[in-house]
Amino acid sequence: MLNTLRMVSVPLVVSSIISSLASLSMKTSSSIGLRALVYYLVTTVCAVITGTVGIDIISMGKETKQSITLGDGMNQLDSLLDMIR
């Protein structure tokens, strides 16, 4: 039932958006496009800043003081293959 609702509602919403955008004047559509572009750029910058600060807070990528050792009789190839298995 939900798939049927999606099959009907998604094309209806998309066609409604397209028809409303087609009926706008050039000045109005360029204003909306400019606002959308500014919104996209601002949210992208916020995401980059949030990610960078988050990485700096948890110190990702820095070496640990513990040494990582493989088990007895294991080599690097075995440990790589264990990730796939």
Image: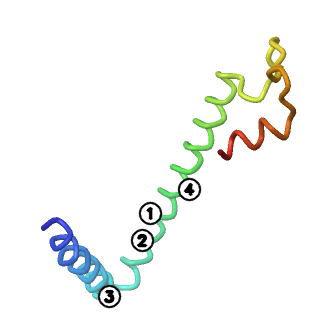
Q: CA distance from mark 3 to mark 2?
A: 14 Å
* Secondary structure of residue under mark 4: helix
Q: CA distance from mark 1 to mark 3?
A: 18 Å
Can you say whether 80 is above or below 72 in the image?
Answer: below
Callout in the foreground (3, 2): 3
Around disc 4, counting alpha carbons within 10 Å, would you say few (fewer than 14), some (14 to 19), or many (20 or more)? few
Residue at horizontal 61 percent and vertical 29 percent from the top? 54
Describe residue 11's horizontal placement relative to residue 42 as left or right. Answer: left
* Secondary structure of residue under mark 3: helix
Residue 9, image quadrant: bottom left
Q: CA distance from mark 4 to mark 1?
A: 10 Å
Please tell me the numbered disc located at residue 41: 4
Please tell me the numbered disc located at residue 35: 1
| Residue carrying label 2 | 31
| Residue carrying label 3 | 22
Figure coloring? rainbow
Around disc 2, counting alpha carbons within 10 Å, would you say few (fewer than 14), some (14 to 19), or many (20 or more)? few
Q: Are marks 2 and 1 in contact (CB under 8 Å)?
A: yes
Quadrant where the image shows the N terminus: bottom left
Quadrant where the image shows the C terminus: top right
- Percent position (x, y) of residue 77? 84, 41
Can you say whether 53 is above or below 16 in the image?
Answer: above
What's under tag 2, amino acid-wise?
Ser
Query: Which residue is nearer to you in this view: 69 or 35?
Result: 69
* Secondary structure of residue under mark 2: helix
Of callouts 3 and 4, the N-terminal one: 3
